[in-house]
Amino acid sequence: MTTDRREWPVYEVFVRPRNGLAHRHVGSLHAPDPEMALEWARDLYARRGEGTSIWVVPASAVTASRPEDREAFFAPFEDKVFRHPSHYHIPPDVENM
Amino acid sequence: MYTQGLDGQIGPVREAETAEEKAREAAFQAKIDAEIRIEPSDWMPEGYRRTLIRQISQHAHSEIVGMLPEGNWVTRAPTLRRKAILLAKIQDEAGHGLYLYSACETLGPTRAELVEQLLAGRAKYSSIFNYPTLTWADIGAIGWLVDGAAIMNQVPLQRCSYGPYARAMVRICKEESFHQRQGYEIMMALANGTAEQRRMAQDALDRWWWPALMMFGPPDKDSVHSAQSMKWKIKRVSNDELRQRFVDVTVPQAERLGLTIPDPHLRWNSERGHYDFGEIDWEEFHRVIAGNGPCNRERLEQRRRAHAEGAWVREAAAAYAEKRARRRAA
Ligand SMILES: [Fe+2]
Ligand SMILES: [Fe+2]
């Protein structure tokens, strides 16, 4: 039995469902190069007209925040409630605001 | 479906010992209880990871092997429309396998390892695919009953605590509905056809009914690993409950076809508000799971042959990618 030990790289797949919407992550696949990744992404993730545009990105090109850093990483915004509109008290008779 | 608790064995898992480890596990369980999904890079107990790897890989293998009994009828579909439909369904199942392998890879195993486990005969897959497809009516029965049972099983998995698995399930469930409907439509055509066609439809139901019920796995009282899976919200609904739901929705569908479910004990129980049904032959179930069903050997051989005969396609794709890369560099 021949099993390929060599793994093709993983590509993350993003699909724009229709114009006006952003590309959205839908999954991933293995492919030998970006062009084939794109064709296979169409076959795998857009068999029913789910998209008008597809991006494939090598998973190795993604830089991500780390879950163990979550608190420290996102903490700077926690005490800045003044960034939210609900922080401000405007009398109810002031309209259009 | 395909998560019928084929065997929940995940080997020895080291229990949390230090106070710190225990606190980490408690925090994990608190997240699960609060319905916060677990994502690939989050910390998780080793047992949770291994249970998921096992379940998702078995599910993926089932989708892949599940293409074989149906592939058996592609060249003999009665019309061009039926042939195109069957091809599209089989292609969907390949897609399901790929979504699930991807989800499984987020937990550690590589694709090559997963494929290797299946080809080497070390992996389990759903018992249902070890039964033969003898007539065209079997293709109808598979869509109606097997995909029907799969839907029953997979719908609650859309809320599984592990994010990538739950998301794969959402995609899969969207696609399954067509599978079941095309199968029922085949059964309708046969049930409304000649006496011979009706006989074929009944024969297919007779052979697929009990194996379909087995798809939900062993009874709750014998599912040793279910309780932990429920606690981790990997599993949301018990085997017996899913099986009961399946029987309840399927009996009226069989009646509508004018077909008889091959179970003399089947009757409506107005007190319970459910159908009572006969005892499942669990010996048969365990025989098939252990590798001794009617088609186990044939399926594995076929899968290996397909993999070996497809080697040149993978090699050609790799060579083409290299050539293109060289050209880009030049
Ligand atoms: Fe499927
Ligand atoms: Fe299906």
Image: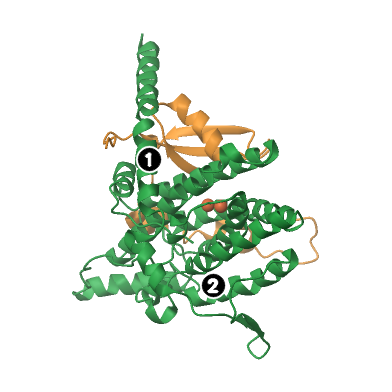
Residue B85: percent from left, percent from top? 64, 42
Q: Amino acid at mark 2?
A: Leu
Chain A, chosen colour in render = orange
Query: Left or right: B85 with respect to B306?
Result: right
Within 10 angstroms of label 2, few (less than 14), some, or many (20 or more) residues? some
Residue A83: percent from left, percent from top? 56, 55
The chain carrying label 2 is B
Q: Quadrant of the C terminus of chain A?
A: bottom right
**Residue picked out by circle 1:** A63
Residue B121: percent from left, percent from top? 30, 51
Q: Quadrant of the N terminus of chain A?
A: top left
Residue B274: percent from left, percent from top? 63, 82
Dots 1 and 2 on the same chain: no
Query: Left or right: B103 with respect to B274?
Result: left
Chain B, chosen colour in render = green
Q: Is residue A63 above or below residue B129?
A: above
**Residue picked out by circle 2:** B242
The colour scheme applied to this rendered structure is by chain
Q: What is the CA distance from the residue labelled 1 to the residue labelled 2?
A: 41 Å
Q: Residue furthest bottom?
A: B271
Q: Residue furthest top?
A: B330
Total marks in image: 2
Q: Is residue B110 above or below residue A72?
A: above
Residue in view at x 80 percent, y 59 percent: A95
Q: Mark 1 or mark 2: which is in front?
A: 2
User: Nearest the camera: A88 or B292?
Assistant: B292
